[in-house]
Image: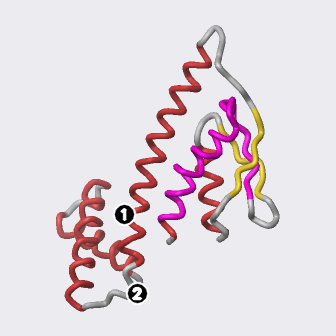
């Protein structure tokens, strides 16, 4: 059984013991289960399965970063929707990418698309770059650098 499956099972057991399967109780059970599995792994000395214990906190960091970027870009788009002279500079840019697995590219492309003001148009057949449309691409190099140092870096951290 994988650590994720055990963690979900512990969260459900936690909720059953508390008599509530509310999302907040399951989240608390998930955190408790994560801590229990982590300490158990340390006691047993199984360090070869440590990937789960690195990936889950990195996924939480990615989620927080994405929510911050989502709110920031929503406010920018809303401001430009009501402004007399919106500061739009639409452009299509090519962004070289490091991730090569289908899942990493899928997550990166969809996170970019879910962020207001940006849209992933295409993935190169050789998986070397994404084609992205942005309404805020006054400086294409800065846009690409921001996406690479922000979103792409965090997606890669989850899977490395």
Q: Nearer the viewer, residue 8 or 114?
A: 114
- Is residue 39 shown above or below 30? below
Neighbour tally class for label 2: few under 14, some 14-19, many 20 plus, Cα within 10 Å: few
Q: In which quarter of the image is residue 12?
A: bottom left
- Marking on residue 57: 1
Say whether residue 140 is magenta: yes
Q: Select label 2 or label 1 by which is in front.
A: 1
Q: Which residue lies furthest to the left in this view?
A: 18
Could you tell me residue 61's position as x and y percent?
A: 40, 55
Left of 102 or right of it: where is 16? left
In the depicted structure, whether residue 12 falls above or below residue 151: below
Q: Which colour scheme is used?
A: secondary structure
- What's the residue at 60%, 44% (across, down)? 114
Q: Quadrant of the N terminus?
A: bottom left
Depth order, front residue of 123/28: 123
Q: What element carries label 1?
A: helix
Q: Is mark 2 on a helix, strand or loop?
A: loop
Prevalent SS, magenta region: helix
**Residue 1 circle label:** 2
Is residue 26 found inside the magenta-colored segment of the image?
no
Judge by depth and name the residue closer to the eye, 61 or 16: 61
> What is the x, y in percent for residue 29?
25, 65
* Label located before the other in sequence (2 or 1): 2
| Residues rendered magenta in the picture | 129-157
């Amino acid at each position: 059984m994988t650590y994720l499956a055990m963690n979900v099972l512990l969260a459900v057991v936690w909720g059953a013991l508390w008599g509530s399967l509310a999302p907040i109780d399951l989240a608390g059970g998930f955190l408790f289960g994560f801590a229990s599995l982590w300490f158990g792994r340390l006691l047993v000395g199984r360090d070869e399965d440590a990937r789960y214990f690195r990936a889950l906190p990195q996924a939480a960091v990615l989620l927080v970063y994405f929510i911050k970027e989502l709110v920031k870009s929503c406010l920018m788009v809303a401001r430009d929707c009501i402004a007399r002279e919106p500061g739009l500079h639409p452009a299509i840019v090519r962004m070289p990418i490091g991730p090569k697995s289908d899942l990493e590219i899928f997550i990166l492309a969809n996170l970019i698309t879910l962020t207001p003001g940006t849209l992933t148009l295409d993935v190169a057949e050789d998986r070397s770059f994404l084609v992205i449309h942005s309404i805020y691409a006054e400086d294409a190099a800065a846009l690409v650098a921001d996406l690479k140092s922000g979103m792409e870096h965090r997606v890669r951290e989850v899977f490395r």
